[in-house]
Image (cartoon, grey):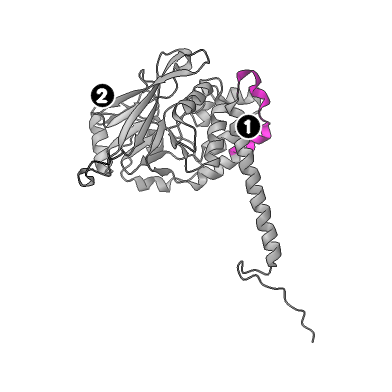
Amino acid sequence: MNVPPSKPVDVKNGSNVPAADVKKEGDKKEREGITVIKWLQTIIDRLKWWSPGHCQKLFLEAELIELCYRAREQFWKSPIKCDVDAPVNICGDIHGQFEDLLAMFELTGWPPEKKYLFLGDYVDRGPFSIEVITLLFAIQVLHPDKIYLLRGNHESRPVNMQYGFYLECRKRYSEKLYDAFQLAFYCMPLCAVVSKKIICMHGGISEDLIDLSQLEKIDRPFDIPDIGVIADLTWADPDDKILGYGGSPRGAGRSFGPEAVKKFLAMHNLEMVVRAHQVVMDGYEFFADQKLVTIFSAPAYCGQFDNAGVVMKVEVPEVPKDTKSSGIDKNILQCSFTIFRPDRDPNGYAKAKK
């Protein structure tokens, strides 16, 4: 009986596929990976030289849909609660103000040289929501450890169907692109903890969030309900007229007072809450004896306000060389604000000062 010789088994991959074929397949995947990286970088580069006059010539709809699918995959890999190490720049609402987003990166540094955490509400209200979310998605897929994108209440179909994003997608491309963006939004994380001390979200704290491990049980994809932990993290607001928790005039999420903030932080062994969701005239506003700060990053919001925008920087302070290390708390964090006012220079960029 003649037994045909068996195919050589590749020891490294443990299969009957010849090693040469495995190497070819690996080389092919590597080339594809390099091609994707170059493509993502071209998206960023095209948007850096963006202008309103030729915005519609920058992308094919198929490109943007592909980007949405890749962003969704990246969000799915990340936990609902992101752990972020300082230093990091934290940004509030952008709301389609793409020119201000470009100006902000020029002022405070572009990723990956600087690390960023965005607190949601990238779309609606402003005129160029597609550019805002496209740039942030491209950077996030290309540098997932250098930019973190949380979900705001406007990253939800019932909301962005009404406040501009749906009409922008339909007018400039089609409903198919709008649906692709929703698939990515439904997988975004809800909150982040910076250096185990500062919890960040779009809306606010929740009375129902007893342990942060609860968030791991949330199944994605999901839309934002009107009540519960998810609603509070994306919709809730501080209110100095109450102490604990109360109803919200928004019709979703709850309101919370200064005592609720302090109890929440003590329960979770945290020191500060950073949230967005509300226009504040100086770009930032403290609450509950500086245990909570609201930040907003869209200056001259909708052209109807005279508010400033802000980027909050969280970093570990440098220890002077002549200082004895024994007297320095190495776990301390330092917060500062870069403020950019709505007045503009001749080039159209917002002026900023620290």
Residues 216 and 331: in front is 331
Q: How many marks?
A: 2
Binning the other alpha carbons within 10 Å of mark 1 as few (below 14), some (14 to 19) or many (20 upward) gives many
- Residue 78 to residue 6: above or below: above
Distance between mark 1 and mark 2 Cα atoms: 41 Å
Residues 227 and 280: in front is 280
Horizontal side of residue 333 vs 155, given as left or right:
left
Q: Is residue 163 visible?
A: no
Location of residue 320 in the rendering, given as x and y in whole percent from the top left corner = 27, 39
Report the residue that reaches farthest toward the bottom: 1
Q: Is residue 146 visible?
A: yes
Q: Quadrant of the N terminus?
A: bottom right
Q: Which mark is residue 177?
A: 1
Report the residue that reaches farthest toward the front: 322
Image: magenta residue range: 50-68
Report the residue that reaches farthest toward the right: 2
> Which residue is rendered at x = 68% and y = 66% of the image?
19
Location of residue 197 in the rendering, given as x and y in whole percent from the top left corner = 30, 41
Horizontal side of residue 354 vs 77, given as left or right:
left
Location of residue 259 in the rendering, given as x and y in whole percent from the top left corner = 22, 32
The amino acid type of the residue labelled 1 equals Leu
The amino acid type of the residue labelled 2 equals Asp
Q: Quadrant of the C terminus?
A: top left
- Is-magenta flag for residue 55? yes
Rendered image quadrant of residue 3 = bottom right
Q: Main secondary structure of the magenta part?
A: helix
Location of residue 288 in the rendering, given as x and y in whole percent from the top left corner = 25, 29
